[in-house]
Image (spheres, rainbow, N blue to C red):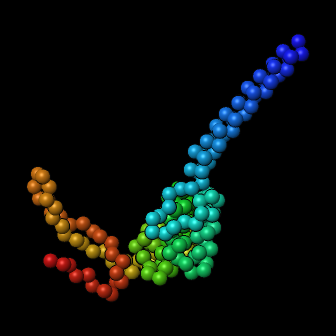
Amino acid sequence: RRAAARRRTRQIGRVMFAYAVVAILVLSTVYVAIISNVSSGPTPTDTPVPTQAQNGGLGQLVTQADQAAATGNYTTAIGLYSAYLSQNTTDAEVHFKLGKAYINSPTPDYAHALDQLERAVNIAPSASFAQEARALLDQYKDKVTPAVITSTAALPGGAISGTAPVTSTLPATQPITPTP
């Protein structure tokens, strides 16, 4: 009887060990599939996002972007803010920060800056930064000049021609000359 009890105990131990191994494999697969994909969102191709930001989640992106903007590295800040906004499009404060980064960058992109500032004001019109955003909109609205481009497109059913408004980031003092 003792030998039978030992065999039974050994058999129960083996089954428990097999269940433990399966549980570990399932949990690690769930972690890799779900948790890792949530913490690392899509990133812009022109500005690499540091590995710390991918592991630290979305909040870390904003923190690193704020640090980059504070040190004058606006290109990195723009990439990090954009990566954050691709996952959280309703964060008005980050839209505001991205607009300011576009304005302060070495090659200012006023069209994108004004777009981001307008989004920030539309999302949170009474936020603490909304007044500054409106002031920046008024200050830089003349830096973006509208232009009209005439185009002709050939389609299978025939040619279509028309005009479309286009936003340019050229300074307002520089005329836009159409090419023939």
- Look at the picture and state if 56 lies above or below 132: above
Which residue is most to the front? 3
Taking depth in this image into account, of 149 and 84 the one nearest to the observer is 84
Taking depth in this image into account, of 57 and 6 the one nearest to the observer is 6
Count up the numbered dots. Answer: 0
Q: Residue 50: which quarter of the image? A: bottom right
Q: Residue at x 15, y 77 (%)?
A: 180
Q: In the rendered image, which quarter contains the N terminus?
A: top right
Relative to 169, 159 lies left or right: left
Q: Residue at x 63, y 45 (%)?
A: 31
Is residue 32 visible in the rendered structure shown here? yes
Taking depth in this image into account, of 175 and 74 the one nearest to the observer is 74
Residue 87 horizontal/vertical position (percent): 53, 56
Residue 119 horizontal/vertical position (percent): 48, 64
Taking depth in this image into account, of 115 and 152 the one nearest to the observer is 152
Which residue is most to the top? 1
Residue 168 horizontal/vertical position (percent): 33, 75
Relative to 75, 173 lies left or right: left
Q: Residue at x 70, y 35 (%)?
A: 21
Which residue is most to the left? 158
Which residue is most to the bottom? 173
Residue 78 horizontal/vertical position (percent): 51, 71
Q: Residue at x 82, y 22 (%)?
A: 9
Is residue 95 visible in the rendered structure shown here? no
